[in-house]
Image (cartoon, grey):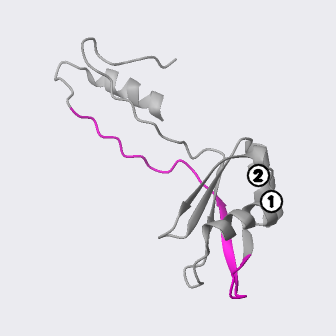
Amino acid sequence: MCGDTTPTGYQRDTVNTTERQSTIVCAFDQRSSRASVYDIHEWVYETLHLQEHEVVMIQIDGPSRHVYIKFSDPQRMQAILTATKWQGNFRHENGEISKDQIEAVGLGMRRVRVASLPPEVEDKTLKMAHRCIW
């Protein structure tokens, strides 16, 4: 069981992060015209047939044209991937239809920076703390 492994007398820094578990990414075609946030929002609910209670968060990454959708239920995420066969069609305002990839997002690699660690902290303490993060 992971507990607080902060050495006695040291302040623990906390960071708010959102895990990419139960998350899909919709990668829109880079060659197609940009879609508005409203159009993407409508597409998510109309095309993927999602209910509001099934979605925890939607994050739009404009420069890379990725839309991340975090689900409250991992089984629903798998059902969406199966139903869409890992791709979707997006109709732009100008009538253009783009084929978009829909994929599950893994945790991927994480970069963790450890700073201001005193030399008396043993390696096993740091390794145990990392196991809690992963």
> What's the residue at 60%, 84% (across, down)?
32
Residue 30, how many percent across, how many down?
A: 55, 79
Q: Is residue 122 left or right of residue 79?
A: left
Residue toward you, 17 or 93: 93
Magenta stretch bounds: 90-115
Queried whether the magenta region covers residue 81, the answer comes back as no
Q: Is residue 44 above or below residue 112?
A: below
**Extreme-left residue of the structure:** 119
Q: Is residue 130 left or right of residue 119?
A: right
The dot on residue 78 is 2
Residue 42, how many percent across, how many down?
A: 74, 65
> What's the residue at 81%, 64% (across, down)?
46
| Circle 2: element type | helix
Queried whether the magenta region covers residue 113, the answer comes back as yes
Residue toward you, 75 or 97: 97
Q: Quadrant of residue 14?
A: top left
Find out whether the residues at labels 1 and 2 contact each other: C-beta distance under 8 Å. yes
Q: Is residue 29 left or right of residue 9?
A: right
| Circle 1: element type | helix
Residue 81, how many percent across, how many down?
A: 76, 59
What's the amino acid at mark 1? Thr
> Dot 2: few (<14), some (14–19), or many (≥20) neighbours within 10 Å?
some
Q: Is residue 49 above or below residue 39?
A: above
Residue 61, how many percent across, how many down?
A: 51, 63
| Residue, disc 1 | 82
